[in-house]
Image (tube, rainbow, N blue to C red):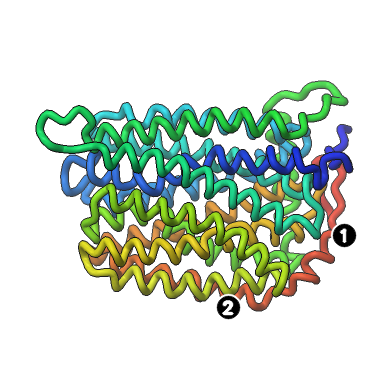
């Protein structure tokens, strides 16, 4: 039976390895910033040639599709993570899914106006590549960092991601500001948006290759090669076995539920900000892109500052601080007057400050609660938890469709932050970390000892 890969001492806390790992966040962040700043608004303002499609506004349709796509993905992610652990193939899976996501991103700008269904299918596949690659990217974290450095390493990844995404968004924003919809203009706003989306795919592929060259190679196979169906069965069996044991680890389970709740709020804000600003606040693409640029650059410092705050007061407490601010953000978004670019940009600055902190510290806090020998599988579960957070955009879309406005929908997001904050306060982090010693893995099986 093939043994699970263990982390050599030579790569744990190795500066070159950590830098390469963090640079993948730099690579894919161009896509995620363009997704929030351009793709959503491009869909509602360009691809949607009518006011409604299937009886839904562009804002409601986009948020519902993103939520449904997230939930569809949740079944596959932990199985893929388990397969990668057992097959010792994190790097290969990371590379392949990153390439798939980037290629479909390159296809997005070629979708003609009015082709709503085609556009949404291509966007969902690009999201699949992004999310699946992140399972294996996150799975490296417990292998390259120790408990005393994992918060700092995770924060560094997010910080470089925000910086890289921000730099790319700055280039895209320059392109968008140079565009014009005046008659006879060569560079129209629509063309600028399409070029920005295409460039994010190129950025993703190019810097992914740079990052992958610095990550440790998958080990040589020590047993005969197995078929994909065999690995899928192994992955499924391990996933079921591990899931069945989670109830015996109440602190880890409580953190997971809290994360699902508050991440539903942050995920909704990221996914629907562009459509909300374009559809409900009636803001133009330049203002929306500028807001996301502000988020990116402030989030770079926010991730580092919250990493320092976590060192001082603890990662759980630092996340709780950020959640209090997120509750205020939801209320502020509800009160922004229509057409108020200043209000939207001010709120974007606040979002940037707390976004990096809640994401980086949640990931690293989770990493200290799970067994390192099955990190990809458990980060597969982490991805499932993230995809369960797709209920946030679904709730937003449902409330928006029911009320005819995104304002009540955005206010409902605050409930996710409140519930997550209450539950997170009850988590005993030290007990959760101690529980790692009670997991035992043997091939496809996991048992509590």
Point 28% across, 67% down: residue: 407
**Front residue of this view, candidates 259 and 253:** 259
**Front residue of this view, candidates 378 and 109:** 109
Q: Is residue 329 above or below residue 382?
A: below
Quadrant of res 424: bottom right
Kind of element beneath mark 1? helix
Point 24% across, 60% down: residue: 280
The 10 Å Cα crowd at callout 2, few under 14, some 14 to 19, many 20 or more, is few
**Front residue of this view, candidates 214 and 326:** 214
Residue located farthest toward the left when viewing the structure as drawn: 183
Mark sitting earlier along the chain (1/2)? 2
In the rendering, at what x and y percent does residue 134 appear? Answer: 60, 43
Checking the image for residue 437, the label placed there is 1
Describe residue 127's horizontal placement relative to residue 208 as left or right. left
In the rendering, at what x and y percent does residue 226 appear? Answer: 76, 24
Describe residue 245's horizontal placement relative to residue 439 as left or right. left
Kind of element beneath mark 2? helix
Picture quarter with the N terminus? top right
Disc 1 + disc 2, Cβ < 8 Å: no
**Front residue of this view, candidates 402 and 125:** 125
In the rendering, at what x and y percent does residue 276 appear? Answer: 30, 57
**Count of picture labels:** 2
Q: Which residue is mark 2?
A: 422
């Amino acid at each position: 039976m093939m043994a699970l890969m263990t982390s050599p001492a030579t790569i744990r806390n190795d500066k070159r390895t950590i830098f390469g790992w963090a640079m993948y966040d730099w690579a894919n962040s161009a896509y995620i910033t363009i997704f929030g700043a351009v793709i959503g608004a491009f869909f509602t303002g360009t691809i949607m040639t009518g006011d409604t499609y299937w009886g839904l506004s562009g804002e409601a349709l986009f948020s519902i599709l993103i939520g449904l796509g997230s939930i569809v993905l949740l079944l596959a992610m932990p199985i893929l993570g388990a397969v990668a652990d057992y097959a010792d193939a994190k790097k290969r899976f990371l590379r392949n899914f990153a390439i798939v996501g980037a290629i479909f991103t390159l296809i997005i700008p070629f979708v003609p106006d009015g082709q709503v269904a085609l556009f949404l299918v291509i966007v969902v596949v690009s999201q699949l590549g992004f999310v699946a690659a992140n399972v294996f990217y996150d799975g490296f974290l417990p292998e390259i960092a120790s408990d005393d450095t994992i918060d700092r390493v995770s924060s560094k990844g997010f910080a470089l991601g925000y910086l890289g995404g921000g730099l790319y968004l700055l280039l895209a924003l320059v392109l968008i500001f140079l565009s014009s919809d005046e008659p006879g203009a060569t560079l129209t706003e629509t063309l600028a948006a399409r070029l920005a989306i295409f460039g994010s795919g190129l950025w993703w592929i190019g810097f992914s290759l740079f990052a992958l060259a610095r990550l440790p190679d998958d080990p040589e196979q020590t047993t005969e090669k197995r078929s994909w169906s065999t690995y899928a069965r192994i992955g499924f069996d391990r996933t079921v076995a591990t899931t069945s044991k989670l109830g015996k680890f109440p602190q880890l389970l409580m953190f997971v539920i809290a994360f699902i709740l508050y991440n539903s709020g942050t995920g909704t804000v990221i996914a629907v900000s562009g459509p909300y600003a374009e559809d409900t606040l009636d803001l133009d693409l330049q203002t929306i892109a500028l807001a996301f640029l502000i988020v990116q650059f402030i989030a770079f410092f926010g991730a580092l500052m919250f990493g320092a705050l976590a060192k001082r007061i603890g990662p759980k407490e630092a996340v709780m601080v950020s959640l209090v601010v997120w509750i205020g953000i939801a209320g502020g978004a509800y009160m922004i007057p229509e057409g108020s670019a200043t209000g939207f940009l001010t709120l974007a600055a606040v979002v940037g400050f707390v976004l990096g902190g809640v994401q980086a510290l949640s990931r690293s806090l989770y990493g200290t609660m799970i067994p390192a020998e099955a990190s990809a599988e458990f980060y597969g579960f982490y991805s499932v938890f993230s995809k369960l957070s797709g209920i946030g955009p679904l709730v937003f879309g449902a409330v928006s469709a029911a009320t005819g406005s995104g304002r009540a929908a955005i206010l409902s997001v605050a409930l996710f932050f409140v519930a997550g904050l209450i539950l997170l306060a009850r988590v005993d982090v030290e007990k959760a970390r101690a529980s790692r010693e009670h997991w035992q893995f043997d091939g496809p099986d996991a048992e509590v000892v």
